[in-house]
Image (cartoon, helix red, strand yellow):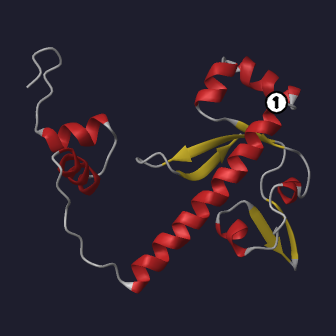
Amino acid sequence: HCFGCSAHGNAIGFLMAYASMGYVDAIKELAAGCGMTVPEEPRSAQALQRYERETDLSAVLERAMDFYREQLKHAPQAIAYLKARGLTGEIAARFRIGYAPDDWQPLKAVFPEYEQASLVEAGLVVENEGKRYDRFRGRVMFPIFNQRGAQIGRAHV
């Protein structure tokens, strides 16, 4: 029990709140701190496939985020917009804010394999009538992260 803020609980709950972990991850972290490992059941083929797909999509989103962050440096209109909203360069860097150029296929420069299905699956590229183009154009981009810090999506204005 914390007499300062009245929070209370156990080590698992503390780690879940403090480190933004899920229950299983908190258990594994505590066990590792004691030199123990948590036994795991083998993953099914379907679970392994889902995990690999999520990992692939995370890598795609990370590459796109890096591209958008670099583009923000060269977009005075986006920088002016952020400043008008009270955001500093420090805040933009901390939250990894970026900018999607106002063009049809700027991600093609980052993804030479622009035809790969994962770009559509990640929501970065739209396929319509046999043509592909970037979903986001002329937008300030805000990455969305899960509890583990992996990027899982993007918000835009």
Q: How far across and down, in percent of the image, does residue 49 sit?
A: 48, 79
Q: Secondary structure at mark 1?
A: loop
82 and 96: which is toward the camera = 96
**Residue 135, visible in the rendered structure:** yes
Q: Is residue 77 above or below residue 29?
A: above
Say if residue 87 shows up in the picture.
no
Q: How many tags in the picture?
A: 1
Q: Quadrant of the C terminus?
A: top right
Q: Quadrant of residue 33?
A: top left
Which residue is at 61% across, 44% downward? 143
Quarter holding residue 4: top left
Residue denoted by label 1:
73
Query: Which residue is depicted at the point 82% across and 67% down?
Result: 114
Quarter containing the N terminus? top left
Q: Residue furthest front?
A: 35
Query: What's the residue type where badge 1 is placed?
Result: Lys
Are there few (<14), some (14-19), or many (20+) residues within 10 Å of tag 1?
few
Place of residue 107 in the rendered image (x, y in percent of width and height, measured from the top left): 82, 56
Image location of residue 91, percent across then percent down: 61, 23
At 80% from the left and 61% from the top, the residue drawn is 111
Q: Is residue 67 above or below residue 94?
A: below
- Figure check: 56 above or below 78: below
What residue is rendered at 74% in x and 18% in y?
84
Seen as rendered, the residue at the extreme right is 103
Classify residue 70 as left or right of residue 150.
Answer: right
